[in-house]
Image (tube, grey):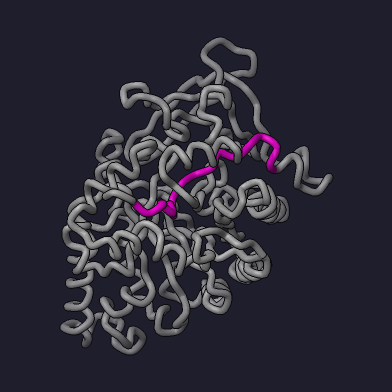
Amino acid sequence: MASFPKIISVDDHVVEPPDVWRDRLPAKFRDAGPRVVRAPVEGMTFRGGRFTPVMGAQGGEGPPADWWVYEDLCRPLTRLDSAVGCSRDEVKLEGITYEDMRPGSYAVAERLADMDANHVQSSLCFPTFPRFCGQTFAEAADHELALACVRAYNDWMVEEWCGPAAAGRLIPLTLVPLWDAGLAAEEVRRNAARGVRAVCFSEIPPHLGLPSVHGDGWDPFLRACDETGTVVAMHIGSSSRMPSTSADAPPAVGSALTFANCCFSLVDWLMSGKFDRFPGLRVMYAEGQIGWIPYILERADTVWEENRGWGGVAEKVLTPPSEQFARHVYGCFFDDAFGLRNLAAIGEANVLYETDYPHSDSTWPRSRAVAEEQMAHLPRETVERLVRGNAIELLGLTPEGLWAGG
């Protein structure tokens, strides 16, 4: 295409700078909050969908890595957190320091420059240390400290990462205290009051020991999202469990199956009745791709219609699942030629584009080229919707594709 629309990426990632919590937590929590230490990696495995790192002694032998330390948790920065700029053969499961990663991973000015190099105008970023829906804080022992950490992260996200230096090009995505739906609702409303229109959530909350979407446990949170127009954003892996088949399955198995949790999650939502109860609620699946969606909608409609007598949803799911999807759900992709060939069965109004910067799957700096190749058969107005128009509408951006702030 002679002139390809500027991309609005709805799934990128930020590696939090070391001072996020040190600078923003109340004084009484500062020493106990998340902090970065440099130490060697004693061991690191990723099998059966489980990541298991072991930190060596500070000052010990071995290649150093920067580790986030918080309560009993020690989590290293890894090459998978910041892989852009490295060849595929260089992207390995190993610990790294901030100096080893591309500065755009954690610094605003450098991020904007890398966005320019990738034909990206605006970007919505998921967290790294808090994990994809803030489950790091939900799993903490001290929930008073954890709540302060959630709020400190959100303040940093809105005021610094997406602050004036970003010129509206970085779009805020905030966390909630997952352990308390009432507090989660309060945090949604607090951030919505300053212009935030997206919040992280888990694709399968029961994997985190939290209620499912089938009961009423999440209703205060969902009501707040409905009433404020806040999108529920669910990233693959936000249940702390990547799809796998066995404890000894190599990471490649889970990588090929990353869409599977989204698939399970979507059926949960479509059969929950929540979209009938909260008509303004909208959810999105980050990095789940889209090619799997048409069959799931077909099967869900069949089950909803044919199994009404015993399926347990007749009285609470009032409209066909495919109609709910069209009004409430968005799939996100960065490399899915098959899905684009079947776009009519998904709905062009329900698809968003992403670049996954700076992760190992990212199409940076070729996101425009990948999109042009895979969308070559689509009309210009459809391409415009996929790479920016739908995101502008969903996230309440300006017509120019920028976040206007509070």
- Residue at x 42% of width, y 67% of height: 283
Q: Quadrant of residue 390?
A: bottom left
- Residue at x 47% of width, y 79% of height: 280
Q: Position of residue 304 (x, y in %)?
A: 23, 81
Residue 37 visible in this rendered orientation of the protein: yes
Q: Position of residue 47 (x, y in %)?
A: 34, 34
Q: Position of residue 73 (x, y in %)?
A: 59, 37
Relative to 326, residue 382 above or below = above
Relative to 385, residue 280 above or below = below
- Residue at x 51% of width, y 27% of height: 101
Residue 142 visible in this rendered orientation of the protein: no
184 relative position to 231: left or right? right
212 relative position to 20: left or right? left
351 relative position to 69: left or right? left
Relative to 105, residue 12 above or below = below
Q: Position of residue 92 (x, y in %)?
A: 37, 25
Compare residues 49 and 405 and report the one nearer the observer: 405
Instruction: Give the residues in magenta.
Output: 4-20
Compare residues 212 and 358 and report the one nearer the observer: 358
> Quick one: quadrant of the C terminus?
bottom right
> Farthest top residue?
61
